[in-house]
Image (cartoon, rainbow, N blue to C red):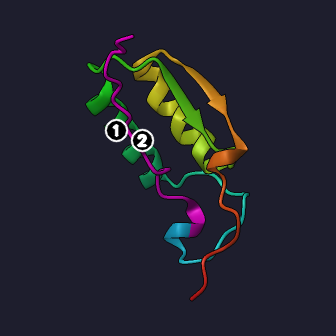
Amino acid sequence: MIFGTKTIYFVRHGQSANNAAKVRQGSAGGLSDEGEKQALFTGERLKNNKIEITLSSPYERAQDTAGIINKYLHTQTETTSLLAERRNPSE
């Protein structure tokens, strides 16, 4: 059996308001204005690629990023807890 090649793009969420304030954050927190610009830029860059689905963590900032990017991709976004951080990184 021969399968076609799949390309996977990994995109981290755009800057969050807490990122900008240099505050360690948990699952809550949306994008900053800069984060929204970053997501728009990413959507523009990816719009001509054949992308079948977008996966996102359940975090608000990731959902916001995926939603903005999908304005360009017109794909379905599936949320999965497999992409959520298991614990905060240490210093």
Residue at the image position 35 percent from the left and 25 percent from the top: 6
Residue at the image position 57 percent from the left and 62 percent from the top: 17
Depicted 1 relative to depicted 48: above or below: above
Find disc 1 in the rendering and name its residue: 42
Q: Residue type at mark 1: give it.
A: Thr
Residue at the image position 34 percent from the left and 12 percent from the top: 2
Q: Which mark is residue 5?
A: none
Mark 2 and mark 1 in contact (Cβ < 8 Å)? Answer: yes
What element does badge 2 sit on?
helix
Q: Residue type at mark 2: give it.
A: Ala
Is residue 87 within the magenta segment? no
Along the line of sight, the residue nearer the viewer: 79 or 82: 82
Is residue 17 within the magenta segment? yes
* Left or right of 48, for residue 86: right
- Extent of the magenta region: 1-18
For mark 1, does the 10 Å Cα neighbourhood hold few (<14), some (14 to 19), or many (20 or more) residues? Answer: some
Q: Which SS type dominates the magenta stretch?
A: loop
For mark 2, does the 10 Å Cα neighbourhood hold few (<14), some (14 to 19), or many (20 or more) residues? Answer: many
The percent position of residue 18, horizontal first and vertical second, equals 59, 68
The extreme front residue here reads 1
The N terminus: image quadrant:
top left
What element does badge 1 sit on?
helix
The percent position of residue 76, horizontal first and vertical second, equals 57, 18
* Left or right of 37, for residue 45: left
The percent position of residue 21, horizontal first and vertical second, equals 54, 74
Find disc 2 in the rendering and name its residue: 39
Residue at the image position 37 percent from the left and 37 percent from the top: 9
The extreme top residue here reads 1
Along the line of sight, the residue nearer the viewer: 91 or 8: 8
